[in-house]
Each structure stands twice: as C-alpha cells, then as structure tokens.
Amino acid sequence: MELYIKQRVFSFRDQFSVTDAQGNQLYEVQGKAFSFGDQLTLTEINGANQIAIKQKLASWMPRYMIEQDNRVIFEVVKKFSFFKTSFDILPSNWTVEGEIFKHHYSLKDGTKELMLVKKEWLTWGDTYHVTIHDEELVLPCLAIMIVLDMVLHNNKKNQHNNMHHNTMHHHHH
C-alpha cells in the first residue's frame, strides 16, 4: 500500500495528513504534544480502527507505547548509542534499518521488509512516501513511523537549544 504523509507546517499541533497517491485522505492524526508527553491518535477515515501513541515519561530514554483497543501492541524505545540512533520495537523483533536521520529507512521483520519510508525533498513542508506491504499492518507501521519522526524532531529541538555547542555539530554517521 502506497501512502503519503504530509506534515503541516503552520499548525500549532503536530499535524500529519495521510493520503493515497491521488490525495484522498485515508487516516487522520490528531493529538497534542503535551509538555508532559506526546499523545496522538491515528484514525482510519472510513473505519473504526484507531491506534493511540503515548509517550511514557518515567523512562530515561524516549519510550512510546502504541495501543490498539486499549492494549499496548508495541513499545518503541530509543536505544542509547553515540554513533547512530537505533530503536527497539518491543515485543516484536522488528528492526529499523537505513538512515533514519535522512528519513530513508525500512522496517523489517527478520529479512522481510514491512515498510519503506522515503522523504521527498522537493516538496514544501515534509512529505514522506511510505510503502507498507501488508494491509493488516498499516496502522501499526504508520504509528511506528510517526514515533520515529517525533523522536527525531525532539532531538532536533534539543540540538537547537544547545546551539552553543555549534562546533560539535558535525555528525559522524
């Protein structure tokens, strides 16, 4: 399934719209980035399916719960590492491979690709081209992609706050 995710630039909330190639909206993302943690819901426009993303604040590293039908189906945890950003997606053994910072990565289950995310750099605002291979997994995969995006976005915000360390800004990837 081919999806396009646009981040709306001028909005007070983190707003994403999820459309197909023709621009029909398929999913709606609503939520607030609270000062005490992000909380979003991802809803199918013409269906009852909904997923919630909640940031778990008690933990030291960014940790997000992805809930469906009030059950936590995944927990996405940013792992601490100096050289690259990597994530655990629990309880699955799914892995994120590729360049997360360049927004070009895939989500894999072993060797099987579940989702491919590519950022389109030509567009105004951020547009991601997302391919999800299994219809059943569209919502969980989208939720994981949004979590990764939020974690990176928060990273960037924190880097801006540390602008004095500008000399340290060369990324060694």
Image (cartoon, rainbow, N blue to C red):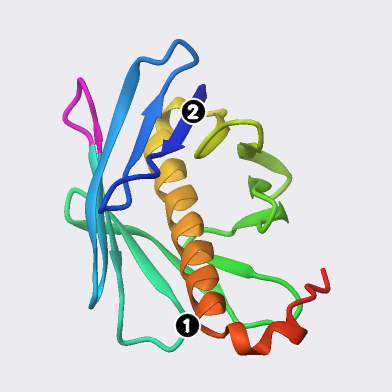
Residue 55 placement, left or right of 136: left
Q: Is residue 45 magenta?
A: yes
**Residue 62: quadrant of the picture:** bottom left
State the image coordinates of residue 69 (x, y, percent, origin top left).
18, 48
* Residue 3, numbered circle: none
Q: Earlier in the sequence, mark 1 or mark 2?
A: 2
* Residue 61, numbered circle: 1
**Residue 63: quadrant of the picture:** bottom left
State the image coordinates of residue 87 (x, y, percent, origin top left).
58, 67
Query: Relative to residue 129, is residue 76 depicted above or below?
Result: below
Dominant secondary structure (helix, strand or loop) of the stretch shown in magenta: loop
> At x 65% / y 31%, what residue is drawn?
122
- Outermost right residue: 172
- Number of marks: 2
Mark 2 residue crowding within 10 angstroms, few (<14) / some (14–19) / many (20+): many
What amino acid is found at the position of numbered circle 2 in the picture? Tyr
> At x 31% / y 75%, what residue is drawn?
56
SS class of the residue under badge 2? strand
Residue 10 placement, left or right of 88: left
Q: Which residue is mark 2?
A: 4
CA distance for labels 1 and 2: 29 Å
What amino acid is found at the position of numbered circle 1 in the picture? Met
Q: Which residues are magenta?
A: 43-49
Q: Is residue 48 magenta?
A: yes
State the image coordinates of residue 97 (x, y, percent, origin top left).
71, 54
State the image coordinates of residue 30 (x, y, percent, origin top left).
22, 45
SS class of the residue under badge 1? loop
Closer to us: 166 or 96: 166
